[in-house]
Image (cartoon, rainbow, N blue to C red):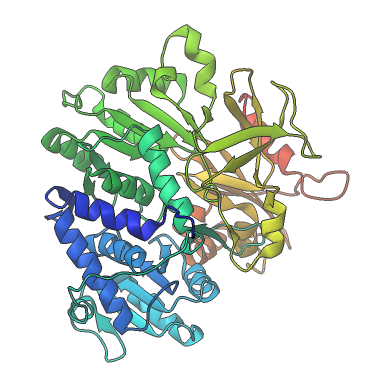
Amino acid sequence: MEATSLVLNELAKRSLVNHAGKTALHVDGASYTYKELHLAANRTAQAFKGYGVGHQSRVGLLLPNCYEYVVSEAAIYLAGATKIALNSMVSKNDVNYILADAEVELLIVHEFYLPVVEQLRSRLPKLHTIIVVGTKNTKKELVSWEDFQAAGSDEELTVKTSSSDFSFILYTGGTTGKPKGVVHTYETTSLTFTSIIIEANIQSDEKILVTTPLPHAAGLYTWAGLIRGAEIFIEDKFEVETVLRYIEKNRITYLSLVPTILYRLLDSLEGRQIDVSSIRTIQYGTAPITAERLKQGLEVFGQVFLQIYGLTETQSAATWLKKEFHSAEAEYSHLLKSCGRSTIFSQVKVVDETGEEVASGDEGEVVVKAFTNMAGYLNQPEKTAETLKDGWLHTGDVGKMDEQGFLYLLDRAKDMMISGGMNVYSSEVENVIQEHPDVAQAAVIGVPDADWGEAVTAFVTAKNGSLDIDEVMAICKAQLSKYKSPKTIHLVDALPLTSYGKIDKKKLREPYWELADRRI
């Protein structure tokens, strides 16, 4: 007898059916019930069949936060296909690489991004169909969203899937300069949604506001909410006044934010009388809140904060710092430097270079064993083997754990920064900078920034003593995603070197981080 497993298409379908009479989405100035979302997703999944997309086909999404994104994602799951989602900040070079590496067969793209895709199409032999959202006037070789929908039927689609089927492939920066495709499965994604519901205590009457890109963590929280039967409000981007209007008018209960956005929200609320009493949870990640900011946040919102620590590779959070530990009381002050304890679906430990667990309080690499860990990196078995060892995912982050199991992050072993909640690998930025003919050497680091967490900062030397920094910055802006471009480029006479003759980035970082008790 075949064992049963938790698979994503069945979980998604059940939620859409079970909550049929409730409002699911508010997006693009309209509202949709779970029944309407189900019908639209099923029709889209049926249309996929007509265009040769079936079980485990690769479907790309290059869309802003919009109704069509949510419908398409639901349809991908109902069809048993695999999602490859890109966000608006991805550069042209990365779009080309991702679509080719993932062998995307059908792409749903907003008309705004269409010029980029059309330039690349000749290099993408696997891409046989492009669906365009936003205009009905498409070229002959393109299909409008309206025509695509008309090709579907309302007949209920049933697809047999396996727990090991690929649910989505999300690309993250790579140390070689090329993104790595992180593969997750129908079972692990189902468990991710379940974990979020439990750990964040998402309720069926939740009103969740989403303002960050759906291809990333915002999409996970959107679907956790939909699985639970919550009401989701979606905006394409974060604007302080828009968020405040949503909170007051719609009595929003749940916000998922990166610290950069949270700080802007707190700054805007200073000295204003705005009713935010409906907020029950503010979940944030990638960096802790400073004690000063936490005190301000507690005064404004109350004890509603949840911090997470996770990676694209873990999909769900590996640790949570719960609401009860977010307190201005002195007894909790040390915990505010922590990113919390492991979840019900994860184990976390700190190990030495041999893989042996270190004693409490000692530094080492953070490793995670979780039901939600990635299956591996697409087409990169060697990188997968380096990262996944005996079921433990090696994060590259340096940390320590106290006797109560609270994890404290201290530094990164990987040459990576997190700016505005987005991963940036130094080598990718350095490779672009060094394309300028007058650049001799380049080194990129992250420096502390009150707004971005870490600001991408470059140090360069000139071949002949002179260099136009504006030209270097222009190259970066033209070739790199916006969040990867340096905020500052410094022209220096020489870069510090280690005893082995390598650029000493630790020495470059020291003046910026010397007063910090952590390097992350």
Foreground residue among 505 and 394? 394
Q: Is residue 305 among the parts visible in the rendering? A: yes
Instruction: Answer with left or right where residue 504 lies relative to residue 45.
Output: right
Foreground residue among 156 and 520? 156
Give the residue at the far bottom of this rendering.
140
Residue ID at (76%, 44%): 504
Residue 224 percent location from the top left of the image: 33, 45
Residue 67 percent location from the top left of the image: 22, 60
Foreground residue among 29 and 113? 29
Residue ID at (24%, 84%): 138
From the viewer's perspective, is residue 502 above or below residue 120? above
Give the residue at the far front of this rendering.
1
Give the residue at the far right of this rendering.
499
Q: Quadrant of the C terminus?
A: top right
Instruction: Answer with left or right where residue 227 lies relative to residue 319.
Output: left
Residue 295 percent location from the top left of the image: 38, 17
Residue ID at (41%, 73%): 55
From the viewer's perspective, is residue 250 above or below residue 175? above
Count every numbered label the image shows and give the total: 0
Foreground residue among 418 and 399? 399
Residue 460 percent location from the top left of the image: 67, 53
Q: Is residue 28 among the parts visible in the rendering? A: no
